[in-house]
Amino acid sequence: MFGRLKVAIMGTGRIAEIMARTLKDTKGVTCYAVGSRTIENAEKFAREFGFKKAYGSYAELVSDPKVDLVYVATPHSEHFENVKLAISAGRNVICEKAFMLNENQAKQIFKFAEEKGVLVTEAIWTRYMPMRTKLAEILSSNVIGEPTMLTANLSYNIAYKERIQKPELGGGALLDLGVYCLHFASMVFGNDVKDIASICTFNNLGMDMQDSITLRYSDGKMAVLNSTVLSTGDRNGVIYGSKGFIVVENINNPEAIAVYDNNYNKTAYYKRPKQKTGYEYEIEACVRAISEGWLECPEIPHAETLKILNMMDFIRSNNHIVFPGENDNPAVSAAETALETEIKPEVETETVTETEAKTETELPTEDQEAVEQGEYEEEVNSGDNSSGTDD
């Protein structure tokens, strides 16, 4: 492939706008096409962000033979069909988190992508960031000794958003926020999880508004993870070791990493390098992968995506969180048939029924918040713009 990759964006919501601004300043790519459910929205987006082509349907978008990479920025509930559509047209794809509603959907997508010989990867941005590599370097230096436990939380007051509230949009805190906590734990401790205990609170539609998750690993390490859409938290991750501890400031877009010794003295402090939006790293990874002919990005291999989805399936199963169609279609069902042979919690899960920093970015404050809070995506229900998205 010669020249710059022609990137197409599927969806015209806030997160698509931020990606469009990112693409303008990212080497190796060009803003080529945008697709929406209406030609009016697509043309407006194309004019504003300098895209050459605008399409009034996703099918038209992926049918353009000049498209090299499709960025899927639609709601969780639409990822499976949207990504499948792009793959069927032979397009490389990077899809927003959570990658799919469940593990079975992801398995089908990865198999289809392999058959078609195209790249498919998850846009879980923390996996691509330089601060991830820095954290790995610090841990491998043994400065805090053997890490034995970590805690992480991600909380934003966003329960009012339609994409959070509704089952038909793949709602809840887990797929939107808890997924970052699980990825943080995975990047530190790996995926040899032996037991999971979880507890949630719910809205009146059965979507989890708050999640508390504890992971126990085969080597005895533990991770305690919390997420809520009902309030605002510090977003920090703390890794506890035999000779000290590490504090990661904002696990959603790490701003700094502080290292402390056993006497609580700060011994090192690493600031995040200047970034455009943070999205540039995942696009740069796709450029490398496509140029090498890889079908997955090494920053987030397919096996990692599947493992995180497997854990989320298990958590949803134990808390009876089901999205429409999962029970009706065995091919995409996972919530009620999570792989208990892989994860068997020692503690019985209790269910309680009850009713998004970009310091050094070029984005306005409002867009900084949108980046962190996951302001995707076009709404599925036409005419309802209550979540603040474009369609």
Image (tube, helix red, strand yellow):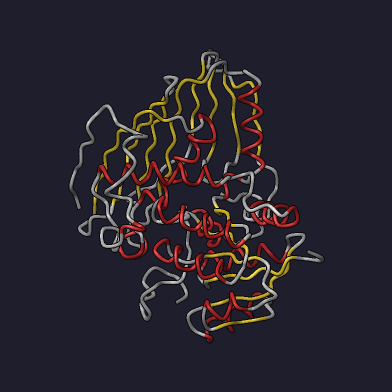
Residue 9 is situated, as x and y percent measured from the top left of the image, at: 59, 70
Residue drawn 77% across the image and 61% down it: 28
Residue 166 seen:
no
| Lateral position of residue 20 relative to residue 153, left or right | right
Pinpoint residue 382: horizontal percent, then vertical percent. Answer: 38, 79
Q: Nearer the viewer, residue 136 or 80?
A: 80
Please identify the residue farthest to the front as the structure is shown: 115
Give me the residue at 19% from left, 49% from top.
354
Q: In the image, residue 112 lies at what x, y percent?
A: 52, 60
**Quadrant (top left/top right/bottom left/bottom right) for the C terminus:** bottom left
Q: In this view, does 71 lie above or below 100?
A: below
Q: In screen coordinates, is 220 left or right of 286?
A: left
Quarter placement of the N terminus: bottom right
- Residue that lies at the very extreme toward the left in this rendered image: 353
In this view, the residue farthest toward the right is: 2
Question: Which one is nearer the viewer's eye here, 217 or 374?
Answer: 217
At 77% from the left and 66% from the top, the residue drawn is 4
Q: How many labels does the image show?
A: 0
Q: Quick check: can you spot residue 198?
A: yes
